[in-house]
Structure formats: structure tokens, C-alpha cells
Amino acid sequence: MNSLDGKVAFISGAARGIGATTARLMVEAGARVAIGDVLDERGRQTVQGIAGESETVIYQHLDVTREEDWSSAIAATVARFGGLDILVNNAGLFLGKGIEEASLDEWHRLCAVNLTGVFLGTKLALPALRERARQSPHGSAIVNLASVAGLVGSQLDPLYSMTKGGVTLFTKSTALEFARKGYRVRVNSIHPGLIQTDMGEQTFISRARNLGSNDVEAVRHQAMSRHPIGRLGVPEDIAKGIVFLASDDAGFMTGAGLVIDGGSTAQ
């Protein structure tokens, strides 16, 4: 028996990177999955690459900052698969600018994706998750993508760190609220270190720029040196953790943060 047999999951920002890898692993673990993103063509390609001609994965257009997009995406998922057991709030934006360089518009956009998107996803998926939880021994699950930048300070991107710190405490607070209300919806966060994705590449470029250098490779090696495990992470490292938190194997976990960072925050 696979760990997600019979489960239905919705993953935001899953056209590529960690979200796409998570979708693939969830299908392999027995789930049916809906992925949402603004990258429509890339999202459809991801669905085709995972599912082929099967009906285990669907794509829904989703701007996580728009309430109407969330409402229609969740409704379509429930209509197609008959319910919703898992929400993964994966969509995120990286700015890569210091406080003095960032504009107010950039800050508003960062908050809209990293904070408002998580709030809307949680709020609008909650009725379906709560309903499905009644049928499951361990209830339903929400997994929020935070970051190690939501646990420790970031000297190069304090605004990103601020939003991910918000996700960290929102996770704990919603876990407590839903437990108090008897909803049987577990909420946990996952905290990646530097991962080799498109966003990871952005961090190397922005860090080089902030240090007054064009040597992205030197920044990459410097980042790797801060990971005691001896390498940077790959999407599958994080996706495996998400699958675990979404499964009944994590049935006694709520309000927790799973750190997958190669040891970088242990120092």
C-alpha cells in the first residue's frame, strides 16, 4: 500500500520546480493531484509528463493572489476527484533585494504571493479539507512551504525572510485554531535550504549582485560550503518531505516545521 492511496491533493505553484516534483511523487504514492499555476503551458506540459493519458493529474490556472482563482480551482478539483485531502501552499516569490533597494510595489507583490496566497489557499480549501477529514483516520493535511529564511535572519534578503517568517507562525496558529475547532486538519510547514531550482538560481544571481560581483559560480560554491552535508538540495529532497507531512505517517504532527537544509541552520 502506498502512503497516499485514495488521497486527493492540490498543489499551488506546481508547474515546475519543487511543486512539479511533489506532484509526481504524490502520484507515485497513490494520490490524484491537481496543480495550479499562472504558467499555463508549462503546467499542462508537467501534467502530461506525469500522467500521460491517465486521469491522475489535472491542471488549473491559478493566480494565488486572486480569491476567485482559488475558489474555481478548488471547486474544479473537488468536482473532478470527489473531495480534497491535502493542500500544499507551494507558490512563492523571491525578491533578492535589500530594504533600501526594494520599492513599495515590489514589497506589495512579495506579500501578495508569499502571504496572501497562503491565507487564501488555506481559507478557500478549508471547507473541502474539513469535509474529507471526517472520513479519514488522521484527518486532512495542509503543508506550507516556508524556508530556512523563515527561521533565521537573512542579511541579503530581509523582506523575503519577513514573509517566510509569517508563513512559519501562520502555520502554527492555524494548526492550533483548527485543532481547537475540532476540524481534524493538520497544518505543518517545510523549510528548505538552498535548492537547485529556477528560484535557487535567482538567489545566486541576486546574492552576487548584492555583493557587487558578477561571479555567480563563486557565490554558488560559497553557498555550498555553508551546507555541512556537502551539496545543495534538489527538488526531490523537499518533495519527499512534503509527501511525508501530507501522509498519515505524519498523523501526530501539527504546527511543526520540518527543516530540510543540509545542516545549514545547525551551525
Image (cartoon, grey):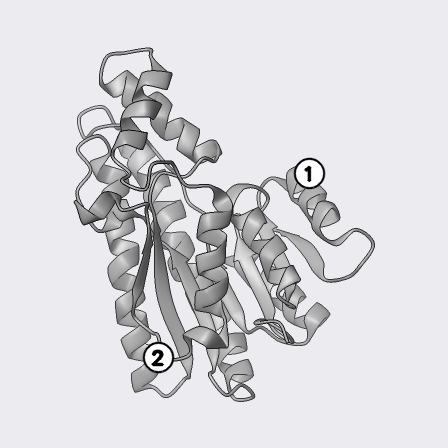
Is residue 65 visible from the viewing direction of this image?
A: no
- Residue 39 in the figure: left or right of residue 125: right
Viewer-nearest residue: 214 or 35: 214
Q: Quadrant of the N terminus?
A: bottom right
Lower position in the chain sequence, tag 2 or tag 1: 1
- Residue 165 in the figure: left or right of residue 53: left
From the image, tell me which residue sits under label 1: 41
Amino acid type of the residue tagged 2 in the rendering: Phe
Viewer-nearest residue: 107 or 219: 219
Viewer-nearest residue: 71 or 43: 43
From the image, tell me which residue sits under label 2: 178
SS class, disc 2: helix
Residue 37's place in the image compared with 198, above or below, is below
Which residue is located at x 32 percent, y 48 percent?
147
For mark 1, does the 10 Å Cα neighbourhood hold few (<14), some (14 to 19), or many (20 or more) residues? Answer: few
The image shows residue 255 at horizontal and vertical percentages of: 30, 70
Amino acid type of the residue tagged 1 in the rendering: Glu
